Amino acid sequence: MTRRDKKILWVGGFLLLAFVGYCATVGVLSLDAPPPDDADLLPHREPLPDEQNAFDLFQQAARRIEEDLTDAHGRALVEMVDGGSYDAAEAADVLRAGAEGLAAWREGLERPGIDVPPITGPDTLMPYVGYWMDLAELADLRALHLARQGKGDEAIETALGLVRFGRMVMHGNGCIITYLVGMTIEQRGLARIRTVAREANLSEETVTRALDAVAPDSPPGHAFAEAMRQEYAVFVHMIDDWKAGRIGSGPDAPSEEVDRLPDFALQVNRTKRVFADHLRPFVAQARQPLSAAAFPQPPRSPVRDIGAVLWAHATGNGVGKMLTVMLSSYDGSFEVKCRREVHVAATRLLLALVACEQATGRLPQTLDALVPEYLDAVPRDGFDGRPFRYDRARRILYSVGPNLTDDGADALPQDEPGEEEGVPPVREREDLVFRLPAE
């Protein structure tokens, strides 16, 4: 054998070994993990029968107001409910135009609940959430108009309808977006109840009815936990679609057939495990206050660095690693859940204090005096889990807020006029303060 033949043999052998090593490496990196044990993350609720589902009625209501309200009506509506520039004649005109929509909305409130259409991925369209926000604004205007006409009891009834509407949306078998929209609608109703309760001379019967109606309709965090389970179900559906070569699926996003992704590019079980491990603490701790909860950091996103992107793909499951960037969108979602609990608790306490003052002529020295005649127990602060704060001399209620520090309620009250969409602005470092009726 010549020197040249030996060289060719050595080079060939090296290339063969390199090829075998490459194939072995790809094979190892293509190995998927076992399926995740995700029974605790699967949605629990069964779909509603058609005759119990209010979705179509609320859609009908939204279409009516879209057709019946002009652009001028819409501008006046926003200025009055969110900007504080109330005008009785303008309000009456807008409400006349939206009367049929409000009638359909009230009919929908008589149904047991809502089931939103299936959400199959991030490309599923949900135009109804915007329409429902418009519908909530119109209902809020009705409550405001009734209150300004001296009809406080009727205003409270409409505001209670908003609270029910928001809770129906939150429990609507939807994802975190529908939960947040429902929470926003509910908070609009709660804020209106607090405003009317401070300013109007309500009957004892109305105060008692409102106190019962704003009590939580489910255990703490239940709607949030179900929304997070729906989020996990959406991710599972999306990952399976991508693996099968379907990009986009569902009635609003017909699937586009592409080449199936190889195991090296997308490992279904391994990717699902990342999503499950990240979302499980949100579900497991949904009943906890912010002070007792702990969450993992989302996986570091490789999409901002081309080198990291190349390395992510070179080391296997590159597509799965790209998909996990979505997990960062849940930062702050648990705080929002806690904020919602604070607004519910503050509204219940304010109504209980109004009822107590109506009956005795004065506010109690402590919130404990409201138990058991008005409340089963003093509501807890959704942020630190301790009993809600109360300052009788200053006639305020307050929560410590997301910084978990009692700053002495040195903050702007939550129900000042001009709040965008009826929801108090997020103040990261302040207590959440709620005013009681003036003496």
Image (cartoon, grey):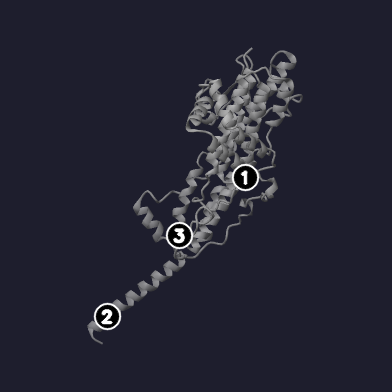
Q: Which residue is mark 1?
A: 56
Q: Residue most toward the right?
A: 373
Q: Nearer the viewer, residue 280 or 47?
A: 47
The quarter of the picture where the N terminus appears is bottom left
Decide if residue 10 is in sight here.
yes
Q: Pointer 3: residues within 10 angstroms few (<14), some, or many (20+)?
A: many
Decide if residue 382 is in sight here.
no
Closer to viewer: mark 1 or mark 3: 1
Q: Position of residue 96 (x, y in %)?
A: 58, 29
Question: Amino acid under label 2?
Answer: Ile
Q: Pointer 2: residues within 10 angstroms few (<14), some, or many (20+)?
A: few
Q: Which residue is mark 3?
A: 317
Relative side of 357 to 84, left or right: right
Q: Nearer the viewer, residue 119 or 55?
A: 55
Q: Are marks 2 and 1 in contact (CB under 8 Å)?
A: no
Sequence-earlier tag: 3 or 2:
2
Q: Position of residue 127 (x, y in %)?
A: 52, 44
Give the numbered dot on residue 343.
none
- Label 3: element kind: loop
The residues tagged by marks 2 and 1 sit, at their Cα atoms, a distance apart of 75 Å
Question: Amino acid under label 1?
Answer: Asp
Q: Nearer the viewer, residue 299 or 327?
A: 327
Closer to viewer: mark 3 or mark 2: 3
The number of discs equals 3
Identified at 62% across, 23% down, the residue is 146
The residues tagged by marks 1 and 3 sit, at their Cα atoms, a distance apart of 42 Å
Q: Nearer the viewer, residue 395 or 24?
A: 395
- Label 1: element kind: helix
Q: Which residue is mark 2?
A: 8
Closer to viewer: mark 2 or mark 1: 1
